[in-house]
Image (tube, grey):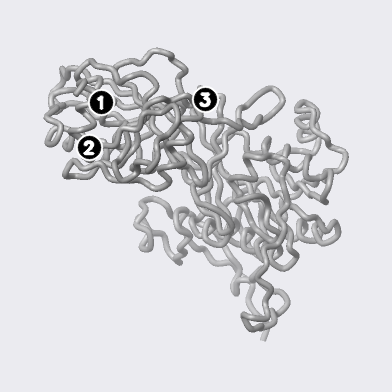
């Protein structure tokens, strides 16, 4: 009996990828509102997963040695990837339009093409546009192979002929499969194309880069399942008025999560910043009330950042709590700790907090520096010059230790800080040259240093 090929209307959630045969206002899987997107698919649905059957092996028969990684030519990109490209891996690079996704990948591809076969497939730009960008950035373009294609089956056919070590698909939202109906960018098309490319990467050993767009909410466009089937998820972050770009990994099967790389957007492309601590410090030689410097741990390296605070009289009905680069809920909690255990009240004042350089604080090691900056602004005092602080604050006012305390301290000393206020449990057993280490057990002891006690 001949199978029917008529199409059927389906609805997919743009948040999680769940599909239903009727429209829904709220996704029954993830709970997102107004996320239903209509598409049409063949009945029965053809699948792009078909391929050769995999052989079954015992675990001790499989070589577990680390395969050599491919260097991209960009040290900061290699750091975020965990030391370079792993063969057969799939990397998703997301970011706002115009933030530099295509630029940094084109730079990496041109450098890798000098030693390896690299294929760059563009579904958005023409080959002439890519050539003009490479010429403007003065990139070595002799070895890079380019193709303009949006059908994923044609891309795989070309890749099997070229046999590249690295394949770049820009972008996954412009790709479509001949097995599915519907416009590119719909939930089934994005999911199916990513699954087909992932299977090709695992079978051929080709490292695949996928460029992904970002929605208004800041999430990578397409279903969340896209982030589950790939190996590495990277995002490029920056504020509109900032020339620096922060490349951060939120998922990495081959390296540290939350690794951070810093680039500067210049006329010749993305320039690596080897010493990011220098750009996140204001460079103001004079200590000012409301400023404190802390040491964050991003991935596998320490990072010095400056936290600024402004406490002002509130003339509205309710005081404001504004945090830029810091979690607002944790700020409210720490203000309560400051009132209870530091005897400094801010319930009738506006509190503004800013992390210099557009960095986003995701760990609790910045708690002590944040409260000391708020206390300094509240009392109009300033911390001693060349002072660095780090430590987690508990609800009972204790200063709790943080991981990698010795490395944080060494990074601060390397940048010229001569005084460190840190948890007593993180205090080094031996004296540190050219640095006064001040261990504290609770918030009251730290505030005593601000008051001169």
Q: Which mark is residue 279?
A: 3
Work out how far the residue at label 2 is from the one at label 1, CA to CA, in angstroms: 10 Å
Q: Residue at x 18, y 40 (%)?
A: 397
- Across and down, in percent, residue 449 comes to 24, 25
Q: Are marks 1 and 3 in contact (CB under 8 Å)?
A: no
Q: Nearer the viewer, residue 71 or 24?
A: 71
Position of the N terminus by quadrant: bottom right
Q: Nearer the viewer, residue 179 or 159?
A: 159
Q: Which mark is residue 374?
A: 1
**Left or right: 98 with respect to 168?**
left
Q: Which mark is residue 446?
A: none
Q: Are marks 2 and 1 in contact (CB under 8 Å)?
A: yes
For label 3, the SS is helix
- Across and down, in percent, residue 9 comes to 52, 63
Q: Which mark is residue 334?
A: 2
Q: Could you say which quadrant of the image residue 353 lies in?
A: top left
Q: Residue at x 25, y 37 (%)?
A: 440
């Amino acid at each position: 009996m001949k199978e029917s090929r008529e199409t059927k209307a389906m609805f997919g959630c743009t948040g999680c990828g769940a599909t239903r045969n009727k429209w829904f206002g709220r996704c029954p899987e993830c709970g997102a509102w107004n996320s239903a997107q209509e598409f049409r698919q063949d009945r029965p649905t053809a699948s792009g997963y078909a391929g050769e059957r995999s052989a079954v092996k015992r675990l001790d028969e499989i070589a577990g040695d680390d395969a050599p990684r491919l260097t991209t030519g960009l040290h900061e990109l290699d750091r975020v990837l965990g030391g370079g490209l792993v063969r057969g891996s799939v990397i998703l690079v997301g970011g706002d339009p115009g933030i530099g996704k295509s630029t940094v990948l084109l730079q990496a591809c041109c450098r890798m093409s000098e030693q390896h076969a690299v294929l760059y497939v563009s579904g958005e730009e023409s080959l002439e546009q890519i050539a003009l960008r490479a010429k403007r950035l003065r990139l070595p373009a002799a070895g890079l192979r380019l193709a303009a294609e949006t059908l994923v089956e044609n891309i795989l056919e070309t890749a099997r002929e070229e046999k590249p070590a690295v394949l770049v698909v820009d972008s996954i939202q412009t790709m479509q499969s001949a097995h599915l109906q519907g416009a590119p960018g719909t939930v089934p098309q994005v999911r199916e194309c990513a699954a087909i490319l992932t299977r090709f990467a695992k079978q051929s050993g080709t490292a695949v880069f996928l460029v992904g767009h970002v929605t208004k909410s800041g999430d990578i466009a397409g279903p969340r399942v896209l982030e589950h089937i790939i190996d590495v998820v990277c995002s490029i972050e920056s504020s509109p008025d900032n020339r620096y770009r922060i490349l951060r990994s939120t998922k990495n099967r081959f390296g540290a999560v939350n690794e951070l790389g810093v680039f500067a957007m210049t006329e010749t492309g993305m320039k690596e910043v080897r010493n990011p601590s220098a750009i996140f410090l204001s460079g103001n030689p004079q200590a000012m009330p409301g400023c404190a410097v802390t040491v964050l741990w991003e991935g596998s390296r320490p990072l010095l950042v400056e936290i600024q605070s402004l406490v002002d009289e509130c003339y509205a009905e309710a005081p404001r709590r504004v945090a830029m680069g810091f979690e607002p809920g944790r700020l409210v909690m720490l203000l309560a700790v400051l009132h209870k255990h530091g005897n400094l009240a801010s319930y009738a004042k506006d509190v503004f907090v800013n992390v210099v350089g557009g960095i986003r604080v995701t760990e609790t090691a910045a708690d002590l520096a944040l409260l000391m900056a708020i206390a300094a602004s509240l009392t109009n005092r300033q911390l001693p010059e060349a002072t660095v602080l780090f430590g987690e604050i508990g609800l009972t006012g204790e200063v709790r230790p943080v991981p990698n305390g010795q490395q944080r301290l060494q990074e601060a000393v390397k940048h010229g800080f001569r005084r460190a206020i840190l948890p007593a449990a993180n205090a080094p057993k031996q004296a540190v040259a050219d640095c006064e280490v001040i261990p504290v057990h609770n918030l009251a002891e730290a505030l005593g240093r601000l008051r001169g006690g």
